Image (cartoon, grey):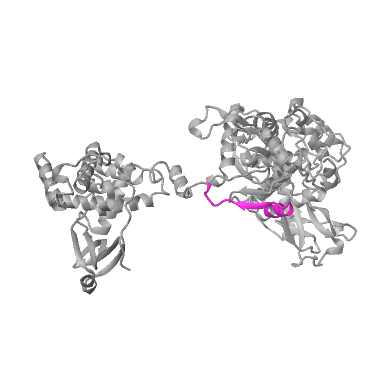
Amino acid sequence: MLELGCRVQFQGRVWTVASFAEGRAGLVGEDGALTAVLLSLLFADTDFEVLGEVQAAAIPPLGLLESLPDAVRERALAWERHVREVETGFPDAGDAAGEPRAQYDPRTRTLTQREEAKAAELSAAGRPASAVTVRRMRARYRREGVWGLVDHRSTRPHTHEGRVDERVVAAVREVLEAGRERSDGTLERLRTYTERLLAERHGQGVVALPSRTVFNRLVHALADGRGLLGSARQRRWRSARPAPPFLPTAVMAPGELVMMDSTLLDVLVVLDDGVVERPELTIALDVATRSICAAVVRPKGTRSADAAQLLAQMMVPAPLQPAWPQALAMEQSVIPYRRLLSVDARLEGAAARPVITPQTVVVDQGSVFVSSSFIAACQSLGISLQPAPPGNAPAKGQVERTFSSIKTLFVQHVAGYTGAHTGERGKHPKGEAVWTLRQLADMFQEWIICGWQSRAHEALRHPMMPQRSLSPNEMWAALVAVCGYVPVPLGCDDYIELMPVRRQKINDYGIRFDYRTYDHTVLNPYRGERSPAADGLWEIHYDPHAPGQIWVRLPDAGRRAGYRFEAVPWIHHTLVSEPFTDFAWQHIRATTARRGSRVQHEHELALALRELLERAAAGCGTHREKAVAARARTAHTAHAGGAVWGILYGRPPGTATPETPAQVHEAIEDEEVPAGEGAWGTRPSELTPADAGACATAPEDARLSAPRRPQVTVYDPVEESLRW
């Protein structure tokens, strides 16, 4: 459709329809030329075509004008005044009330005459220009405004490559990309690899490399800001970094989003037998309040049971330890203790740490957090599990930043601090290590309450007090008043549900996995039978920190739940009375060759485990064996002493527990030990000749007074649930 403002093609040129009068159309060319043509002739032309509507003049890009050199910008603004004067007679819009100059008066001079007058004026002023130039500048001004009058030689984009051969640029890019995963190297190595690649692609000497100065400048231009240079660690982090933008997550309620992660602490602790190692910390951070809801400090190798323990720790109040000051009690904090106590009686005597039930838990792709046991634990508690994308640190940036704060606010002040890497390490950090793992864990739990939960956090702001930062406890008190508090009591079965799970048959010999056989008379009615589940397998829960027993879910019509958990011990639990973990068992499996049947091999593994633990207790064995035994005992002790699990290891209830090695030794000597390979096995003084030879270098008092731990009792979840 032909209308005013349309762009048409006529006689090989592009015109804009400016007017309609008496069957004629007024046309304006791109160069400013004017013409009038009959509509009949216009439509009859074989080249006639309606191209579309004319584009409205856009607002001048003032930001781009400001980026130009002063001389270029002033020249464009001067041309704008000249073009206005040619078209309207006035160089500025504010001068329209006066009279135009005679040579530019539209009433007496044609447009062509005005263009010629402007060209003569500019030439006389020392800026040679023709009428065609003036006409072209008018056309640019109509299309692009002031930006069309700019000398665009100054706006050409500057390439980082300069005048370097494109083949060299492509080769450098390829070598840089191929070196992302390589170890650090110099620019000279990069130049050598580029030269080899060019010779391979184009022939020897066909493409010459620029000088070293130009080559190095080219490398930095291509690599800087793209993660292609720098250390190998920086390059790996840059390549795994997701594409921005990173949008913050809005969380409005406690427990709405909880992040879990693990890290090695930059501090050395003393394990049993004097072994010095860096412990591993696993925390659960509530994003809404920045509260460290739970924390577990373990030797290297956090297991899924530790992650599940975090879930349970979050839902139960933290007990106030006897050695802690009364100021750390919840009753003395800003938390509305009296109101919450009327809802949850478990808060009586609790420490000032929030009790938060998680709704969504964000974890990384670590095997601990994506294991079937941890997923099952989250499902049993109604928690949504959200794994973060691989290598996406911003997805859980809050917990990563919390680890950094823990290292600066707590870890660096602990004896045995090692620094983040060897370049920051002192001369003798092992000699400074004096704290045991249990002591460090206790100190950290106390620091969470007195140091972290009461410390103002810049990210926590109250809507009514945006200028004041709040502490995690203050933020929790503010949000719990709005969102409410619903206690989630955990029963005896809930603790077992949180443990790792597997499904197996109950055979005539019991239940066997990982070369350990578990059996008890409670399994007699179910041997060889299918379970009520669809797959016909029985549900089994086990604790990696205490493999001496398992729990089997058995049907029980007398209970409302329709099932009960029965503890089934390892058949060799009386042979190996020392506490051990799955880590120690895997070490024995890797170092003991199988020479007989499966049953005989399991018995040999149990003997080898007992000998390992006894040699380590007597101060004998290799450094590796001592480390394995020490890590097993430390993890077992820390796990058994947890406020949530409360697994009762040691002597049976009601029996006084020896406190010193001498008392332990006296208690063992008073025990009635069955003959043969009975419940206690051999003492350090009853080792075989080969073992005795291995311990010949050990001090006499160490061999005689080596502590002998009592038999491990079966965990009673009912008694544990009564503690809460």
State the image coordinates of residue 602 (x, y, percent, origin top left): 73, 55
State the image coordinates of residue 474 (x, y, percent, origin top left): 68, 33
Quarter of the image that includes the C terminus: top right
Q: Residue at x 30, y 67 (%)?
A: 2
Residue 26 in view here: yes
In-front residue for pair 232/249: 249
Image position of 221 with respect to 518: above or below: above
Quarter of the image that includes the N terminus: bottom left
Image position of 34 with respect to 104: above or below: below
State the image coordinates of residue 34 (x, y, percent, origin top left): 19, 59
In-front residue for pair 439/73: 73
Is 628 positioned to the left or the right of 650 in the image?
left
Is residue 314 part of the magenta span, yes or no? no
State the image coordinates of residue 675 (x, y, percent, origin top left): 85, 46
Is 632 positioned to the left or the right of 135 in the image?
right
The count of marks equals 0
Q: Quadrant of residue 350?
A: top right
- The residue range painted magenta reads 374-393
